[in-house]
Amino acid sequence: MKVLLSAFHCFPGVGSEPGTGWHWPRALADLGHDVTVLTSSSNREAIFAEGTQDIDFRFIDESATPLGRIAPQFAGLDVYLRWQDAALRYVEESRQQYDVAHHVTWAGLHLGSRLWRLPVPLVFGPIGGGQTAPASYWRYFGRNWPAETLRTALAGPLLKLNSRCRQTIRNSAVILVDNSATAAACQRLGAADVRSMQAYGLPGEWLADARLRPNGTPVILWVGRLVARKAPVLAVEAFAELRRAIPARLIMAGDGPLREQVCRTVERLDLSRDVQLLGHVTWDEITRLYDSASVLLFSSLRESFGAPFLEALGKGLPAVALDLHGIGDADVGDAALKVALPPRPRDLPGRLASAMQTVLCDDKWEVRSAAAVDWAAQWVWPRKAAAATQIYQEVMAGRR
């Protein structure tokens, strides 16, 4: 069938959302669909270098925004909204016919999609965005807490005032969500059909065999941007508690505005010899880190789900994570230990440390590794594309 994809972020050879935007059209084309992709022209060079023979990419330019000087923190959002409008105009003017439209990136509730205006059914997502940070853990957000409080309001009582979001939700044939909080938000706005699907996926070749417990000093791996909602300082505090009990090393892969604060925390806790901050790393380096680490620590206090969690499990690496949002909703069995948020935030580092020590020291490491691969296998891209195809068939039949 003729599928129109909206994938503002679409970049081959990477993970997270840009990788998601690339793998959706690739997987759908492999199933024989006639796929047209609307994406930002900033992705053109990387996409052409990868090869696009069986996918029709349409590159839409990003427009300048006056907010760059007035309110730079909102400039990126305004550029994206203007790009959505330009992409819709392009499709309307091209007069091409499609069987179904599918919006995949950005995968956010609040910014919606303009493709509902087309005369074809729209599948929206998988998306997140309905989840909010726990208020009692405000100290990990520091100076970012006022902005986080505003975001919480926008995801809750003020969401119904967001006309772009509301119109998208009410006019989508199917909305795919990757956590229960986002599902509830969509239902409050009048969604007709909300279903669960993990936003991220894995190439089939990513899956590893179940592994043996690594030898030597255990390595705790943390992957992500050093931003407040991912709580990298919490990760360092939890590692400090673990380090009091057993020898271990912490490797943090990623960079961001909290790097200096993380460095200060490492020095304050006298962990300089045991913590390595790698900064930004390549996709190949991330792969090697997953293959050699002993456990993934996922400390995000607000996360739709979390690509590193899925990627680590696909490599047979057990995880310790907060029992929160998308990960809290997922039944991963022995693949991960999920830690509930205690009423007193100061107790959380110790509880995370205890969970890491359990994974590192009990006799179930190999069992956890096998469970991790088994769970991750359900989210490989061919299976996700097959599930999407079934949804396309349903909505097309309903439209007829």
Image (tube, rainbow, N blue to C red):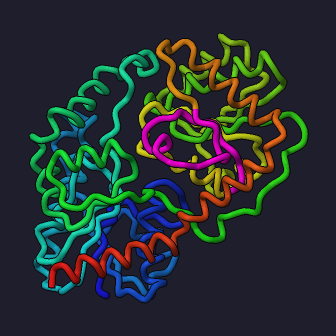
Q: Is residue 263 left or right of residue 294?
A: left
Picture quarter with the C terminus: bottom left
- Kindly identify the residue that appears in the image at 15 percent across and 66 percent down: 116
- Kindly identify the residue that appears in the image at 90 percent across and 42 percent down: 215
How many tags in the picture? 0
Report the magenta residues as a range: 315-338
Looking at the picture, tell me which residue is in the foreground, 150 or 321. 321
| Residue 376 appears in the figure | yes
Task: Where is residue 206? Give x, y as percent.
Answer: 65, 65
Q: Is residue 354 above or below residue 347?
A: below
Q: Is residue 143 above or below residue 203?
A: above
Q: Is residue 55 above or below residue 281?
A: below
Task: Where is residue 384? Give x, y as percent.
Answer: 46, 70
Task: Where is residue 283? Give x, y as percent.
Answer: 62, 56
Picture quarter with the N terminus: bottom left
Name which quarter of the figure residue 9 lies in.
bottom left
| Residue 40 appears in the figure | no
Q: Is residue 93 left or right of residue 235?
A: left
Looking at the picture, tell me which residue is in the foreground, 320 or 20. 320
- Kindly identify the residue that appears in the image at 29 percent across and 86 percent down: 2
> Does the magenta segment cover residue 271?
no
Looking at the picture, tell me which residue is in the foreground, 250 or 318. 318
Name which quarter of the figure residue 172 lies in.
bottom left
Q: Is residue 344 above or below residue 98?
A: above
List the single residue furthest toward the right.
216
- Kindly identify the residue that appears in the image at 14 percent across and 52 percent down: 190
Task: Where is residue 94? Give x, y as percent.
Answer: 15, 82
> Does the magenta segment cover residue 324?
yes
